Image (spheres, grey):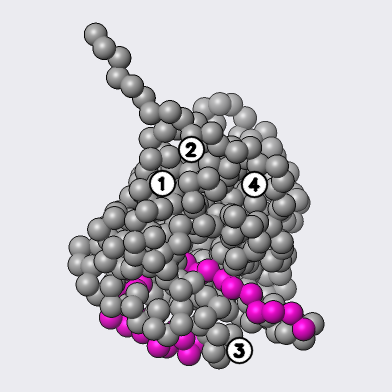
Amino acid sequence: MLTRVRFLSARQRGAEEQLLWSRDIRFVHRLAAVVRGSRVLDLETGTVLIAPRDALTEPTAADVAGTVNGPEYGLVAVDGSLPSSDRYLVAMSAAVQLSGLADRIGMAQSTQVVQTKMLDYFVSLRKLHGVAFQPIVELPSGRLHEYECLSRPEMPMLPQSITSIVLAAISTGRAVELDGYLVATILERVGRLEAGTRAAGGEPRRYAVNLTPASLLDPTFEAAAMADQVRAADLDPHQFTIECTEQQAVSDVAPLQRQAKTLRRLGFGFAVDDAGAGYASFTLIAALRPSVIKIDREIVQGIGRDDAKQALVEAFVSFGRRIGARLLAEGIERRTDLATLTELGVDLGQGYLLGRPAAEPGLPRRIDRLRRVVPRPPRVPSRA
């Protein structure tokens, strides 16, 4: 069985390595002859070559492979942070998939299997992942309101965005597990930052944290337990806004409505993300009664020159005032858009123009001399 193959001795396991897999045994042995420190394993499914990373490179492999129609292979880095019992099997699986031959040798994987492995790999690298902080700004004054906490995965062998990881967690029924891990990571980081702020005599800062509706709707999720988790980090629920990041339609709003109400009662702010796009409709927002409505970046970008987008945001501003919610525009990158949003009465904003995500919370960028938006006269239909 493949799982019984022992790739390296204990003495060799700490090295930075590359792994190549191919069905062409002669190609692999020719390559081994020119790559220093290489080891070859002939398996039933193909032949594996393991060598130091600086010796086994893509140009070297391509040079030995020769012609355009040469042998097919997959070459990947071996992740030394994984347990020694797993790292080479994970690398070989990745190399087989990369070669394009997985179907032929019976190693093709279903979407859910791939997603499960990706999540397992993500969790196994828990010490590498980071948190970035992007400022959210009070638009009328330009003052800092809070920071959105953005998870930054570090997955050397399988680079992924946090969005793809969240979607995989929802698809495989592991949303609560993933959200719990991400929140714990954020609280640990924020707890250290706030301890330093208190020691320096500074004021507590506010933070926004993302949770999926799938997690909030799971029977195992308890808002009170999350509040306890925040307090255990020597923080206060009033310092946090929970952003409900919509990734799928919510068929039954009532349970989500109860969770939102409980979170607010415990002191958390509650925001609905991506308003005006996807599933974040007026009906859903009205039911949840959030403290913040985040306007989707697709609506924000270019709004300075788009009458239809301006009309939609005006509707959201009026709607937000009626239900007691503040409007937050995300993805602000142009001065004209910022000026338009401010003129329309949007309360809060974030985006590269105001401040990029950073490993340390920083002050927002100061924007002076915004160009005032001159309201356009209403259009008069032409007479035929």
Q: Which residue is mark 2?
A: 303
Question: CB atoms at circles 4 and 1 under 8 Å apart?
Answer: no
Q: Earlier in the sequence, mark 4 or mark 1?
A: 1
Measure the C-alpha gap from mark 2 to mark 1: 9 Å
Q: Amino acid at mark 3?
A: Asp
Q: Which residues are magenta?
A: 201-229
Measure the C-alpha gap from mark 3 to mark 1: 38 Å
Q: Amino acid at mark 2?
A: Ile
Measure the C-alpha gap from mark 4 to mark 1: 19 Å
Q: Which residue is mark 1?
A: 313
Q: Earlier in the sequence, mark 3 or mark 1?
A: 3
Q: Earlier in the sequence, mark 3 or mark 2?
A: 3
Q: Which residue is mark 4?
A: 353
The nearer-to-camera label among 3 and 2 is 2
Where disc 1 sits, the SS reads helix
Depicted 39 relative to depicted 213: above or below: above
Residue 305 horizontal side relative to residue 139, left or right: left
Residue 286, picture quadrant: bottom left
Question: CB atoms at circles 2 and 1 under 8 Å apart?
Answer: yes
Classed neighbour count for the residue bearing mark 2: other residues with Cα under 10 Å, few (<14), some (14–19), many (≥20): many
Classify the position of the N terminus by image quarter. bottom left
Where disc 3 sits, the SS reads loop
Asked whether 183 or 84 is in front, the reply is 183
